Image: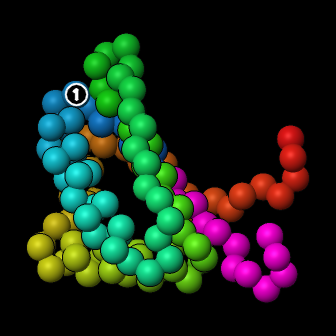
């Protein structure tokens, strides 16, 4: 990466969704790309899924941003959109039994 350019940030969420909550979760999941794809610094968004042996959904979302600043602004925008529609993610996760592992990653500079 050329000197002086901001380092990309990758926001990765891994959700485990009990099978009885999959429909509500996926309906909700479809809304976020419509918010973030229009924001400054957005690069791409991908969603991966699989089912475990019990039929629960394991879902990973990966959003890539040009910089830490772009990611922070996106988080604020998404939070404001949730508040505007009176959506509480923590409440939905608790009610549906969803667990989440969330984090912000940067690209490893070393080749492995």
Tell me, yes or no, if residue 79 can be seen here.
yes
- The x and y percentages for residue 73 are 44, 82
Residue with the most extreme left position = 85
Q: Main secondary structure of the magenta part?
A: loop
Who's the residue at 31% across and 43% down the image?
98
Who's the residue at 73% across and 81% down the image?
5
Q: Residues within 10 Å of mark 1 (few under 14, many from 20)?
A: some
- The x and y percentages for residue 37 are 36, 67
Report the magenta residues as a range: 1-12
Q: Quadrant of the C terminus?
A: top right
Q: From the viewer's side, name the closer residue of 23 and 47.
A: 47
Q: From the viewer's side, name the closer residue of 11 and 94.
A: 11
- The x and y percentages for residue 8 are 64, 69
Residue with the most extreme front position = 2
Q: From the viewer's side, name the closer residue of 79 and 109.
A: 109
- Taking the image as shown, residue 11 lies to the left or right of residue 53, namely right
Who's the residue at 34% across and 74% down the image?
38
Q: Residue 56 sits in which quadrant?
A: top left
Residue with the most extreme top position = 53
Q: Which residue is mark 1?
A: 19
Tell me, yes or no, if residue 102 can be seen here.
no
Q: Is 8 contained in the magenta span?
A: yes
Q: Is 67 contained in the magenta span?
A: no
Quick check: 99 above or below 36? above
């Amino acid at each position: 990466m050329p000197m002086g350019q901001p380092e990309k940030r990758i926001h990765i969420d891994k959700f485990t969704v009990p099978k009885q909550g999959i429909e509500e979760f996926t309906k909700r999941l479809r809304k976020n790309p419509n918010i973030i794809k229009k924001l400054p610094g957005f690069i791409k968004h991908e969603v991966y899924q699989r089912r475990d042996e019990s039929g629960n959904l394991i879902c990973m979302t990966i959003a890539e941003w040009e910089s830490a600043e772009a990611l922070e602004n996106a988080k604020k925008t998404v939070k404001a959109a949730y508040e505007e529609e009176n959506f509480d993610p923590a409440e939905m996760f608790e009610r549906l039994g969803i667990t989440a592992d969330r984090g912000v990653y940067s690209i490893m500079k070393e080749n492995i």
